[in-house]
Amino acid sequence: MSPISPRFTTVDGLRVRYADSGGTGPDALLLSPWPESVYAFERVWEQLSGHARLVALDLPGYGGSQGAGELRSPEAMGGFVLRAVEALGLRRPHAVGPDIGTSALLFAAARDPRAFRSVVVGSGGAAVPVNVTGILKEWVEEPDPDRYREVDPAVIVDTALGTIKGYTAPAHVREDYIASYRDGRFAESLAYVQQYPAQLPRLAGLLPGITTPVRVVAGENDAVVPQENALFLAERIPGSRADFVRGAGHFCWEEQPAAYAALIADWWDTH
């Protein structure tokens, strides 16, 4: 049985999906990666819930959450994250934002220095000029996102999961990922990363002003988001650091869950 039990609430008029571990301790907000969902944290849930009360959130347009056109950019999504913290009743939570959560969470931390106790990001585009490779580069530069409406999301999900060494997703996880991007939702989700060329330079200008403690965690062998992205952030955010999960690829939270969770828990316990 999965330790994650999704539920729904309304934030800014949008029906969003989240999971809550309950328990005591400081709050921690986990933003789901793409093309996944709150179930991406299933392998680290038990380990991390020993350090904080976890609230995993599918961002609008991703996972099981309703989308909104005006939120399909990192900066706009960062504003939504701040409103979600308030709506969910979280008290200055730790925040974890892998993949697309990286840019959204950093925009949020730059806007409100008191919003989070600490931040962990990584595996998301951050460098300027944009430095992503493989299929992610194709998605960022895709001139006709609507053509992905005709692509079976199972193909996209299975291709992504196939890059995770030593891991076969349980049926309920795979099916949730696929369901999350049916009915044209994957095509619509591309708009977010297509904003990287316009918005990452703006984010880069804000990085030196971030005062929240930031740790960047990424897979050592990420085939779509090179290490330079993590180093770019660590060099510009005061007091931050970059750590690479040895031998892991892009989806390091599922490929090396114990190592990934240990780095997060260490950051939480330090701050």
Image (tube, rainbow, N blue to C red):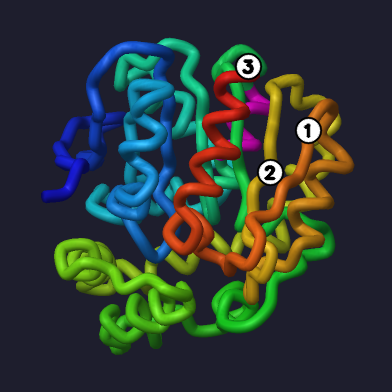
Q: Is residue 95 above or below residue 44?
A: above
Residue 176 locus on image (x, y percent): 20, 62
Q: Is residue 221 above or below residue 116?
A: below
Region of the chain picked out in magenta, as a range = 105-111
Q: Which residue is mark 2?
A: 216
What predominant SS class does the magenta segment belong to? helix
Q: Secondary structure at mark 2?
A: strand
* Three-letter residue code for mark 1: Ser
At 33% across and 30% down in the image, what residue appears? Answer: 55
- Of the image marks 1 and 2, the number of the one nearer the N terminus: 2
Residue 220 locus on image (x, y percent): 69, 63
Residue 158 locus on image (x, y percent): 34, 81
- Between the C-alphas of marks 1 and 2, the distance is 8 Å
* Three-letter residue code for mark 3: His
At 42% across and 74% down in the image, what residue appears? Answer: 166
**Would you say the residues marked 1 and 2 are in contact, meaning their CB atoms lie under 8 Å apart?**
yes
Q: Secondary structure at mark 1?
A: loop
Residue 103 locus on image (x, y percent): 62, 46
Q: Which residue is mark 3?
A: 271
Q: Which mark is residue 240?
A: 1
* Three-letter residue code for mark 2: Val
Q: Is residue 255 rendered to the left or right of residue 178?
A: right
**Would you say the residues marked 1 and 3 are in contact, meaning their CB atoms lie under 8 Å apart?**
no
